Image (spheres, rainbow, N blue to C red):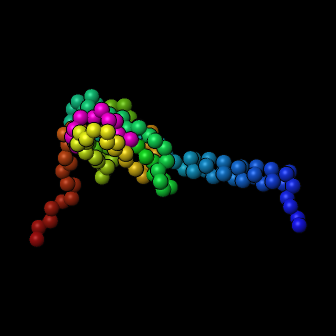
Amino acid sequence: MNRPTLRQMARRSASLMAAGLMLTLGACSALQPADAEQFASNPPLAPGWQEHTSPLYNLGPGPTAGTTVWMVSALLPRGNYQVISRQGDRARILEGHRFEVDGTVNKEIRLILPFASGSLEAVEERYVIAQASTKPKTKP
């Protein structure tokens, strides 16, 4: 019976770790930072929204690849909230990501979002200005 020696096992482990490190570095280098133009073009928020946001807490990777789990602060007052990605005084609304705080005691709200952004916050929906449709109306 041919058993691998300790040296061969260590060599295989080291090569697997090196391959994993290369894959990780390759995946991180493919990520592009958010453009300032992207943030400047999408702030449909009412004046004073900066004082009425609450950070979301990153809990790490989600249950599936490419997702991240975020936890909502238990100190938020009742209401409807939308998730924004913020850089200073500029923000971008993440479409389709909203939640409601109903005041239930000991209730944890966790969001599973399909990305790992650096600074996500919750803003009350009353500070989100509805955008007008950009599609031109056609006559029948």
Q: Is residue 3 left or right of residue 23?
A: right
Residue 34 % position (x, y): 43, 43
Above or below, 54 relative to 114: above
Residue 40 % position (x, y): 33, 39
Q: Quadrant of residue 46?
A: top left
In the rendered image, the residue lying farthest to the bottom is: 140
Q: Could you tell me which quadrant the N terminus lies in?
A: bottom right
Kindly tell me whether residue 130 is visible in this rendering: yes
Q: Is residue 67 left or right of residue 131?
A: right
Q: Is residue 12 or residue 48 the one in the foreground?
A: 12
Above or below, 116 relative to 52: below
Q: Is residue 101 or residue 40 the one in the foreground?
A: 101
Residue found 37% across the figure and 31% down from its top: 88
Q: Is residue 3 left or right of residue 89?
A: right
Please check the rendered image and state whether residue 75 is part of the magenta-colored stretch, yes or no.
yes
Residue found 41% across the figure and 37% down from its top: 57
Kindly tell me whether residue 120 is visible in this rendering: no
In the rendered image, the residue lying farthest to the right is: 1
Q: Mostly what secondary structure, the magenta segment?
A: loop
Please check the rendered image and state whether residue 76 is part of the magenta-colored stretch, yes or no.
yes
User: Which residues lie in the magenta part?
Assistant: 71-80
Residue found 50% across the figure and 55% down from its top: 65
Q: Could you tell me which quadrant the C terminus lies in?
A: bottom left
In the rendered image, the residue lying farthest to the left is: 140
Residue 12 % position (x, y): 78, 54
Q: Is residue 9 or residue 93 the one in the foreground?
A: 9
Residue 9 % position (x, y): 81, 54
Above or below, 39 relative to 88: below
